[in-house]
Image (cartoon, rainbow, N blue to C red):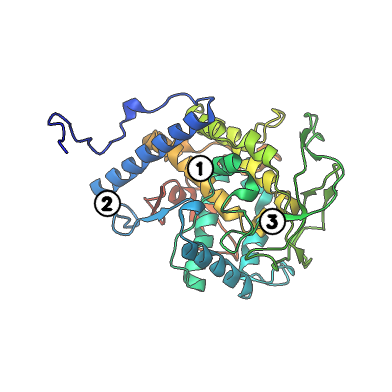
Amino acid sequence: MAVSTNAIPTPQEEASAADLPTQASSDESQANDQLAQLAQFVGQTTNETLSQNEKRGGCSLWNLSVRREWSTLTKEQRKAYTDAVLCLQSKPARTPSSLAPGAKSRFDDFVATHINQTNYIHYTGTFLAWHRYFTWSYEQALRNECGYTGVQPYWDWALSGLLGLEKSPILDGSEYSLSGNGEYIVQTGDIILGGSNGLPALILPTGTGGGCVKSGPFASMKVNLGPAGLALPGGELEVNGDGLSYNPRCLRRDLTDAIIRQYSNATAIAYNILKPKDVYDFQMTMQGYPGSGNIGIHGGPHYAIGGDPGRDVNTSPGDPIFYAHHAMIDRVWWIWQLLDQKTRTGTNGIAGTGTFLDSPPSANTTLDTIIDLGYAAGPPVTMRDLMSTTDGPFCYTYL
Ligand SMILES: [Cu+2]
């Protein structure tokens, strides 16, 4: 068969800054394409800067690790990840029981640290960097303490919105997922957030589960800590003291497609990357401006998982999906940062103070602010160390 002689071989498509989208498409599939284009461009940028100059932590193209979406992992890779999580849940805690009697395992050390610091790491200047360090430290624990040789996977929420949560590879309940929905139970009333500080309450629907998770790798896991602020259907808040005592119970989930589709679809993600020009707007859009009626792309998946500890901001790392969710949060931040690397990985890439919505008022977060994960992991580092995924202690990128 003859081949046309004037056929020009298609060159490997190089993403250029000039071709990047500037505004989120309201069309879900176009927004997905925009996100892929942005991720490709910043991935390229990451690789270029790595080959150009020396990085503080010695990060190079040779030791760079690549975080991937759950559904792109092989079954063996998925199993290796959940096996390592189960291993972490079987190792004894380092947190003294005098501080957190409920922390029984190394997995719980992370939950206890998050409970302890909840009011200092959400709606603060440290939110993004703290959770970046937390997720990375968890990944390191899986690798160094449980023989995991893979990388922390992330969860593309838009994909789950399109497929439906229960049909998503990450939540389908199979042995190659992070377990799935909880058993169906009758739930009465909606989830009601806020409304106590003069701002309008935000109403969220319940989902299709609500009971204990009964299949997949985490079918028999015990949630030991919390709750410290669990939103229950009907509007009650369940609090068990400071959340640090021993309170073993099953992992509950209440998968809610309507929530993930409304708040964390591809358009919302692209909007969160393209619209905010400063980090204050970026992180507030992501967490939801209080009173705006929007819980943001960060809140969406937390509440779409639902259940216990899914609806408890304090105890949420008690559900193993927390880390894949926060890897995606980190990926969105990584994309946003690299679209204006100089500004967004330095002083001007930080906004906010050390307390939840600056209440009570506290000092501004700076590059010198110290982040300490307590007994979960160490060492304490400064914000300066956490602003780049390749220049400092970290050496990873995202596909
Ligand atoms: Cu958090």
**Disc 2 on helix, strand or loop?**
loop
Q: Residues within 10 Å of mark 2 (few under 14, many from 20)?
A: few
| Residue 141 visible to an observer of this rendering | no
Task: Tell me what residue is drawn at x 38 percent, y 37 percent.
Answer: 341
Looking at the rendered structure, the number of numbered marks drawn on it comes to 3
Residues marked 1 and 2 touching at CB (< 8 Å): no
Disc 3 marks a residue whose amino acid type is Ile
Q: What residue sits 66% from the left and 53% below the top?
A: 117
Q: Which of the marked residues, 1 or 3, is nearer the chain's N terminus?
A: 3
- Outermost residue to the left: 5
Q: Residue at x 44, y 48 (%)?
A: 384
* Residue highlighted by disc 3: 115
Please rate how many residues cluster around mark 1, counting C-alpha atoms within 10 Å: few if below 14, some from 14 to 19, many from 20.
many
Please state which of the two labelled residues, at mark 1 or mark 3, is closer to the viewer. 3
Instruction: Say which element carries label 3.
Output: helix
At 49% across and 48% down in the image, what residue appears?
383
Amino acid under disc 1: Thr
Q: Which residue is mark 1?
A: 366
Pick whichever, 179 or 228, lies toward us: 179
Q: Position of residue 308 (x, y in %)?
A: 75, 55
Question: If you read the primary sequence from the N terminus, does the residue marked by circle 1 or circle 2 appear first?
Answer: 2
- Work out how far the residue at label 1 is from the one at label 3, CA to CA, in angstroms: 23 Å
The answer to which quarter of the image holds residue 46 is top left
Q: Is residue 136 left or right of residue 122?
A: left
Residue 194, percent across and down? 78, 37
Classify 226 as above or below 274.
below
User: Could you tell which of marks 3 and 2 lies nearer the N-terminus?
Assistant: 2
Q: Which residue is mark 2?
A: 54
Along the line of sight, which residue is nearer the eye, 125 or 61? 61
